Each structure stands twice: as C-alpha cells, then as structure tokens.
Image: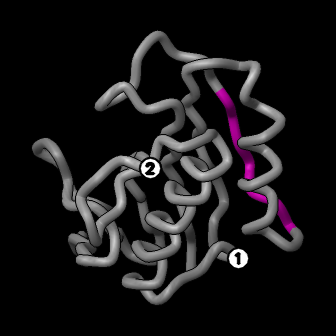
Amino acid sequence: MKKIINTTNAPAPIGPYSQAVLVDNTLYVSGQIPLNPKTNELVMTDIKAETKMVMENLKAILNEAEMDFSHVVKCSIFISNMNDFAQINEVYGSYFSSNFPARETVQVACLPKNVNVEISAIAVK
C-alpha cells in the first residue's frame, strides 16, 4: 500500500515524481533543492542559506507525513562542489540531535536548476 505525500509547504515537483511516497511505515522523500515554496524562487545567496532551505523543505514534507528528523534513517546529499561540504554539514547537522542517519555525500557535475545542493531522505515511523 503506497500513499503519495504532498504539501504546499515544500516546492511542487518539477518533473514526473512525488514529493514523497509512504509505504507502510517507510517514507521515501524525493531530493529537495533550495526552492522557496512561498515565492517559487531559488535561494542562492550562499551555501548555508541554500542548505537551510533544502532542510526546511525536507522538514515540511516529513511534517506532512506526521514525522520529523528523528525518524530519518538515511540521507543522500548531492553537492556541486566538495569544498562546500563543511558548511553544508554544519547546517545539515543542526537538524539532528542524536542517532544520526546513515548518509552519503557525492559531488556531481550538475544539479536541477544548477543549484549547489540537493538532499533526499528515507524515514521510518
């Protein structure tokens, strides 16, 4: 049984995918970019602001599924420049208090809309 999770508090998908899919107690959250759902504009002022917007988008989707970051078991972080890793990690880490999820961070050549960071998540209730 799968349930599509959708909220106006996170950016609408820019392609043929859902913000998240809930299967039993597991939530699969699509990669989020620093797109402000209120203005539909990219937050590109600096890497910390971009990462914060990405995390806020993830938070909104988790909340729609009645979850929070304590439910996250795995994240995938895609960045355009590995030199930004420390700043991304600082913001990312501020959303978790303990029992950190598994994760990988990968530098990629290009991300949607030429952003610098995209993060996806898997959460379990």
Residue visible at 47% across and 41% down in the picture: 44
User: Which residue is labeled 1 in the image?
Assistant: 70
Q: Residue at x 60, y 49 (%)?
A: 51
Q: Position of residue 50 (x, y in %)?
A: 55, 47
Left or right position of 81 against 66? right
Residue 111 percent coordinates (x, y): 39, 25
- Is 84 placed left or right of 66 in the picture? right
What range of the chain is rendered magenta? Answer: 99-105
Above/below status of 43 relative to 118: below
Q: Is residue 49 visible?
A: yes
User: On residue 43, which mark appears?
Assistant: 2
The residue positioned farthest toward the bottom in the image shown: 66
Amino acid type for the residue under numbered disc 2? Val
- From the top left corner, tell me how far across and down residue 94 is, in percent: 80, 64
User: Between disc 1 and disc 2, whose residue precedes?
Assistant: 2
State the SS at label 1: helix
The secondary structure type at the circle numbered 2 is loop
101 falls in the magenta region: yes
Q: Are marks 1 and 2 in contact (CB under 8 Å)?
A: no
Instruction: Residue 21: give x, y in percent of width and height.
Output: 30, 64
Direction from residue 51 to residue 101 in the image, left or right: right
User: 119 and 48: which one is in front?
Assistant: 48
Q: Nearer the viewer, residue 115 or 5?
A: 115
Image quadrant occupied by the C terminus: bottom right
Is the residue 123 above or below the residue 48 in the image? below
Q: Quadrant of the N terminus?
A: bottom left
